[in-house]
Image: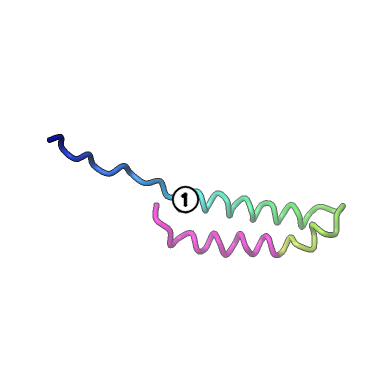
Amino acid sequence: MTPALPPAPQRRLFTRSRVERVTLGLIGLGLLMMAQPFFMVLFTYSLLVTLIGTVGFALSNYLPE
């Protein structure tokens, strides 16, 4: 009989580093949307995008490495 192989390591979708990168990107995108003078629609949603990024960054502290 052959010995049992150890289980393969699972890749996690929501790791701290990935979520931090995405949320920092959202914060930056929200700031760019706020600063641009061309499209009122982008300015309208800029605060929402920035807030989602900020809350996501704060919550990423509770995710595993």
Please tell me how crowded label 1 is: few (under 14), some (14-19), or many (20+) other residues with Cα within 10 Å.
few
Identify which residue is drawn at 15% across, 37% down: 3
The residue drawn where x is 40% and y is 46% is 11
Going by the numbered disc 1, the residue's amino acid type is Leu
SS class, disc 1: loop
Q: Is residue 31 left or right of residue 14?
A: right
Q: Nearer the viewer, residue 10 or 29?
A: 10
The answer to whether 16 appears left or right of 37 in the picture is left
Q: Position of residue 54 (x, y in %)?
A: 59, 62
Colour scheme shown: rainbow
Q: How many marks?
A: 1
Which residue is rendered at x = 52% and y = 63% of the image?
58
Say which quadrant the N terminus sits in. top left
Task: State the residue in front, 6 or 55.
Answer: 6
Residue 34 locus on image (x, y percent): 77, 57
Q: Residue furthest front?
A: 1
- State the image quarter where residue 45 is shown: bottom right
Drawn side of residue 41 relative to residue 46, left or right = right
Q: What residue is pinned by disc 1?
A: 13
- Chain part drawn in magenta: 48-65
